[in-house]
Amino acid sequence: MTNLALKTPVSDIENPLENAETLITALYKAVDGKSISRLGSFLADDLRFQLGNFDAVTGKEAVLEANENFFQIIDTMTHRIDGIWAQDNDIICKGEVHYKRLDQSELSLPFATVLQMKSDLIQDYQVYVDVTPL
């Protein structure tokens, strides 16, 4: 199944919000599944990624490695998306992420994500969340 969000820039379609919803749904399915290969399919080679107050990471391979390291410190996570907004090639979403830690205790945190798209891929990926309690 082809993902429309990966084929058509947000700014080039009739309903950018519909495309943004498709992209966010597929992106967070990959993240919640802790799938590095699926996550990689959304990312530009030269992207910038920042999670919370951690230092920004640049480059697809470095970003995938950082995500793989993060995935190893939790058992599972599930994102609930409460809102999605799109303008030009920018997509913003907010919601709540529910974590199950390795010790099986659980934690839910609010988050917001800002994506800048370029050539159908994520060029800048900023996640606003305080993961300190993890």
Image: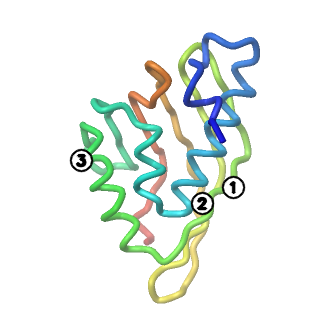
Q: Is residue 25 above or below residue 7?
A: below
Quarter in which the N terminus is drawn: top right
Quarter in which the C terminus is drawn: bottom left
Q: Is residue 22 above or below residue 106?
A: above
Residue 80's tag is 1
Residue annotated with mark 2 = 97
Kind of residue at disc 3: Ala
* Residue 48, picture quadrant: top left
For mark 1, does the 10 Å Cα neighbourhood hold few (<14), some (14 to 19), or many (20 or more) residues?
A: some
Q: Secondary structure at mark 1?
A: strand
Q: Secondary structure at mark 3?
A: helix
Label located before the other in sequence (2 or 1): 1
Kind of residue at disc 1: Arg
* Residue 36, picture quadrant: bottom left
Q: Where is residue 108 shown, x and y percent of the image? A: 60, 67
Kind of residue at disc 2: Val
Q: Where is residue 76 shown, x and y percent of the image? A: 53, 73
Q: Where is residue 129 shown, x and y percent of the image? A: 48, 52
Q: Residue at x 54, y 54 (%)?
A: 30
Q: CA distance from mark 3 to mark 1?
A: 26 Å
Name the mark nearer the viewer: 3 or 2: 3
Residue 62's tag is 3
Marks 2 and 1 close (CB-CB < 8 Å):
yes
For mark 2, does the 10 Å Cα neighbourhood hold few (<14), some (14 to 19), or many (20 or more) residues?
A: some
Marks 3 and 1 close (CB-CB < 8 Å):
no
Nearer to me, 24 or 99: 24
